[in-house]
Image (cartoon, rainbow, N blue to C red):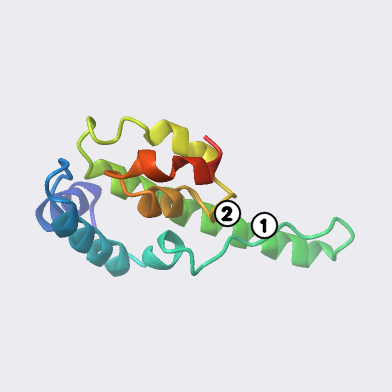
Protein backbone atom coordinates (compact mmCIF):
# COMPACT_ATOMS: atom_id res chain seq x y z
CA UNK A 1 0.00 0.00 0.00
CA UNK A 2 1.36 3.39 -0.92
CA UNK A 3 2.16 5.92 1.75
CA UNK A 4 -0.27 8.52 0.34
CA UNK A 5 -3.04 5.90 0.16
CA UNK A 6 -2.30 4.86 3.75
CA UNK A 7 -2.37 8.49 4.86
CA UNK A 8 -5.68 9.01 3.08
CA UNK A 9 -7.15 5.96 4.80
CA UNK A 10 -5.97 7.22 8.20
CA UNK A 11 -7.51 10.64 7.52
CA UNK A 12 -10.81 9.00 6.66
CA UNK A 13 -10.83 6.49 9.52
CA UNK A 14 -9.62 8.65 12.42
CA UNK A 15 -10.83 12.16 13.26
CA UNK A 16 -8.40 14.85 14.35
CA UNK A 17 -8.47 15.05 18.13
CA UNK A 18 -9.47 18.64 18.87
CA UNK A 19 -10.24 18.45 22.56
CA UNK A 20 -14.00 18.00 22.30
CA UNK A 21 -14.11 14.59 20.61
CA UNK A 22 -11.87 12.41 22.75
CA UNK A 23 -14.23 9.43 23.17
CA UNK A 24 -14.93 9.13 19.43
CA UNK A 25 -11.26 9.71 18.55
CA UNK A 26 -10.08 7.15 21.10
CA UNK A 27 -12.26 4.39 19.64
CA UNK A 28 -11.29 5.26 16.07
CA UNK A 29 -7.58 5.39 16.92
CA UNK A 30 -7.69 2.13 18.87
CA UNK A 31 -9.34 0.41 15.90
CA UNK A 32 -6.74 1.86 13.51
CA UNK A 33 -3.80 0.81 15.68
CA UNK A 34 -5.28 -2.69 15.99
CA UNK A 35 -5.70 -2.93 12.22
CA UNK A 36 -2.00 -2.08 11.81
CA UNK A 37 -0.72 -4.48 14.47
CA UNK A 38 0.37 -1.64 16.75
CA UNK A 39 -2.14 -1.89 19.56
CA UNK A 40 -0.28 -4.43 21.74
CA UNK A 41 2.71 -2.08 21.99
CA UNK A 42 0.49 0.94 22.60
CA UNK A 43 -1.48 -0.71 25.40
CA UNK A 44 1.69 -2.08 27.02
CA UNK A 45 1.02 -5.79 26.47
CA UNK A 46 4.00 -6.19 24.15
CA UNK A 47 7.04 -5.29 26.21
CA UNK A 48 10.34 -4.18 24.79
CA UNK A 49 12.99 -6.88 24.68
CA UNK A 50 15.78 -6.28 27.15
CA UNK A 51 19.33 -6.23 25.85
CA UNK A 52 21.13 -9.51 26.42
CA UNK A 53 24.27 -9.79 28.50
CA UNK A 54 27.42 -9.33 26.39
CA UNK A 55 28.49 -12.85 27.35
CA UNK A 56 25.46 -14.33 25.53
CA UNK A 57 26.21 -16.11 22.23
CA UNK A 58 26.61 -13.78 19.26
CA UNK A 59 23.65 -15.32 17.38
CA UNK A 60 21.37 -14.76 20.39
CA UNK A 61 22.56 -11.15 20.76
CA UNK A 62 21.98 -10.53 17.05
CA UNK A 63 18.44 -11.97 17.19
CA UNK A 64 17.74 -9.95 20.33
CA UNK A 65 18.99 -6.78 18.63
CA UNK A 66 16.65 -7.37 15.69
CA UNK A 67 13.70 -7.95 18.06
CA UNK A 68 14.50 -4.73 19.92
CA UNK A 69 14.78 -2.75 16.66
CA UNK A 70 11.48 -4.20 15.39
CA UNK A 71 9.82 -3.22 18.68
CA UNK A 72 11.29 0.31 18.51
CA UNK A 73 10.06 0.72 14.93
CA UNK A 74 6.54 -0.41 15.83
CA UNK A 75 6.52 1.93 18.83
CA UNK A 76 7.65 4.80 16.59
CA UNK A 77 4.91 3.95 14.07
CA UNK A 78 2.23 3.93 16.77
CA UNK A 79 3.49 7.17 18.34
CA UNK A 80 3.66 8.92 14.97
CA UNK A 81 0.23 7.68 13.94
CA UNK A 82 -1.34 8.96 17.15
CA UNK A 83 0.30 12.38 16.83
CA UNK A 84 -0.72 12.74 13.18
CA UNK A 85 -4.35 12.72 14.31
CA UNK A 86 -3.98 15.14 17.23
CA UNK A 87 -4.46 18.86 16.72
CA UNK A 88 -1.14 20.60 17.50
CA UNK A 89 -2.82 22.75 20.14
CA UNK A 90 -3.78 19.55 22.03
CA UNK A 91 -0.35 17.95 21.54
CA UNK A 92 1.65 20.81 23.05
CA UNK A 93 3.33 18.47 25.54
CA UNK A 94 4.19 15.64 23.12
CA UNK A 95 7.93 16.38 23.04
CA UNK A 96 8.14 15.84 26.79
CA UNK A 97 6.87 12.29 26.27
CA UNK A 98 10.19 11.24 24.79
CA UNK A 99 11.27 10.95 28.46
CA UNK A 100 8.64 8.24 28.88
CA UNK A 101 10.55 5.75 26.77
CA UNK A 102 11.45 2.83 28.96
CA UNK A 103 9.45 4.04 31.95
CA UNK A 104 6.07 2.79 30.75
CA UNK A 105 6.97 0.53 27.87
CA UNK A 106 7.43 3.13 25.16
CA UNK A 107 6.41 6.51 23.88
CA UNK A 108 3.19 5.31 22.24
CA UNK A 109 2.10 3.65 25.50
CA UNK A 110 2.86 6.76 27.54
CA UNK A 111 1.10 8.98 25.00
CA UNK A 112 -1.99 6.76 24.94
CA UNK A 113 -2.34 6.31 28.67
CA UNK A 114 -1.67 9.93 29.48
CA UNK A 115 -4.42 10.79 26.98
CA UNK A 116 -3.68 13.82 24.86
CA UNK A 117 -6.50 15.62 26.68
CA UNK A 118 -5.39 14.60 30.13
CA UNK A 119 -1.60 14.82 29.89
CA UNK A 120 -1.20 17.24 32.72
CA UNK A 121 -3.01 15.00 35.17
CA UNK A 122 -0.57 12.12 34.79
CA UNK A 123 2.69 13.55 33.44
CA UNK A 124 4.35 13.04 36.83
CA UNK A 125 4.24 9.27 36.19
CA UNK A 126 6.73 9.80 33.36
CA UNK A 127 9.14 11.86 35.44
CA UNK A 128 8.69 14.96 33.32
Q: Position of residue 90 (x, y in %)?
A: 24, 35
29 up-or-down from 98: above or below: below
In the rendered structure, the answer to whether residue 35 lies left or right of residue 25 reads: right
Which residue appears at 51% of the width and 52% of the height?
106
Which residue appears at 77% of the width and 66% of the height?
59
In the rendered structure, the answer to whether residue 122 lies left or right of residue 90 reads: right
Q: Nearer the viewer, residue 71 or 128?
A: 128
Marks 2,1: beta carbons within 8 A: yes
In which quarter of the view is residue 87 placed?
top left
Which residue appears at 64% of the width and 62% of the height?
49
User: Element at badge 2?
Assistant: helix
The residue beneath circle 1 is 65
Q: Nearer the viewer, residue 105 or 122?
A: 122
In which quarter of the view is residue 32 placed?
bottom left
Q: Residues within 10 Å of mark 1 (few under 14, many from 20)?
A: some
Could you tell me which quadrant the N terminus lies in?
bottom left
Numbered badge on residue 29: none
Q: Position of residue 56 (x, y in %)?
A: 85, 64
The residue beneath circle 2 is 69
User: Element at badge 1?
Assistant: helix
Q: Position of residue 57 (x, y in %)?
A: 85, 66
Q: Position of residue 99 (x, y in %)?
A: 54, 38
In the rendered structure, the answer to whether residue 125 lies left or right of residue 66 reads: left
Amino acid sequence: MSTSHESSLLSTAVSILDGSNYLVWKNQMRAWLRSKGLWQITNGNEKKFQELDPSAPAAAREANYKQRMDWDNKDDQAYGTILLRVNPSVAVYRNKLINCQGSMGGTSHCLWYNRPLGYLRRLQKCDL
